[in-house]
Amino acid sequence: MRFASLVHELKKSAFARAEEGAMIIFGLFLFVIILMTAGLAVDFMRYESNRVRVQSTSDRAVLAAASLREYGDREELVREHFEKAGLSAYLDSVDYDEALNSATVTVNTRLGVDTLFMRWSGRYGQKLVTLDQAAF
């Protein structure tokens, strides 16, 4: 019995001194950190891509609707721009004011993008509200 406990103690002390595989835990930790950073970049890229699409469509629609060369319903013109771009779900409201030789058009948009990787940190979506206005 004494011999078995001596062998057990030797194995235990050898295990405590062994350093094989110590970097695996650190490497796995770094891998998770790199994966989360890359995921944040992907989420921000998706958000920014959608934001630019909505913003440029809104800019074009507002300028076209406020232009004095356009006749007809200015709100319908803005809605058509968003419909053709496939972004009509993001259009919140369209307001316009016409005078004798001028027009002011205001467009509000609401954009929500679900996150894929930021969920790990507790953020499930990014939201943006924009306001565009043009007057001619």
Image: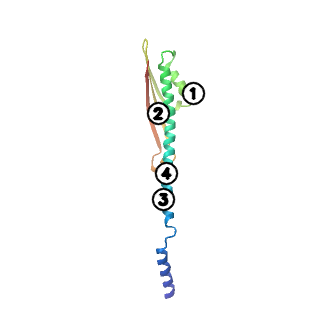
Percent from the top left, x then y, of residue 99?
42, 14
Pointer 2 residue? 110
How far separated are the C-alphas under marks 3 and 4? 11 Å
Q: What is the basis of the colouring in this image?
A: rainbow
What type is the residue that disc 1 sits on?
Answer: Lys
- Counting other residues with Cα less than 10 Å from the Cα at mark 3, is it few (<14), some (14-19), or many (20 or more)? few
Nearest to viewer (mark 1 / mark 2): 1
How far separated are the C-alphas under marks 4 and 1? 36 Å
In this orientation, does residue 90 appear? no
- In the rendered structure, which disc, 1 or 3, sits on the residue that comes first in sequence? 3
- In the rendered structure, which disc, 2 or 4, sits on the residue that comes first in sequence? 4
Q: Is mark 1 on a helix, strand or loop?
A: helix
What type is the residue that disc 3 sits on?
Answer: Phe
Instruction: Check the image and report above or below for 58 versus 3.
Output: above
Q: Which numbered marker is on residue 36?
A: 4
Q: Residue at x 48, y 27 (%)?
A: 59
| Contact flag, marks 2 and 4 (Cβ < 8 Å) | no
- In the rendered structure, which disc, 3 or 4, sits on the residue that comes first in sequence? 3
What type is the residue that disc 4 sits on?
Answer: Met
- Counting other residues with Cα less than 10 Å from the Cα at mark 1, is it few (<14), some (14-19), or many (20 or more)? few
- In the rendered structure, which disc, 1 or 2, sits on the residue that comes first in sequence? 1
The number of callouts visible is 4
How far separated are the C-alphas under marks 1 and 2? 17 Å
Q: Which residue is drawn at 51% across and 24% down?
A: 78
Instruction: Check the image and report above or below for 123 versus 84.
Output: below
Percent from the top left, x then y, of residue 63?
48, 22
How far separated are the C-alphas under marks 3 and 2? 38 Å
Pointer 3 residue? 29
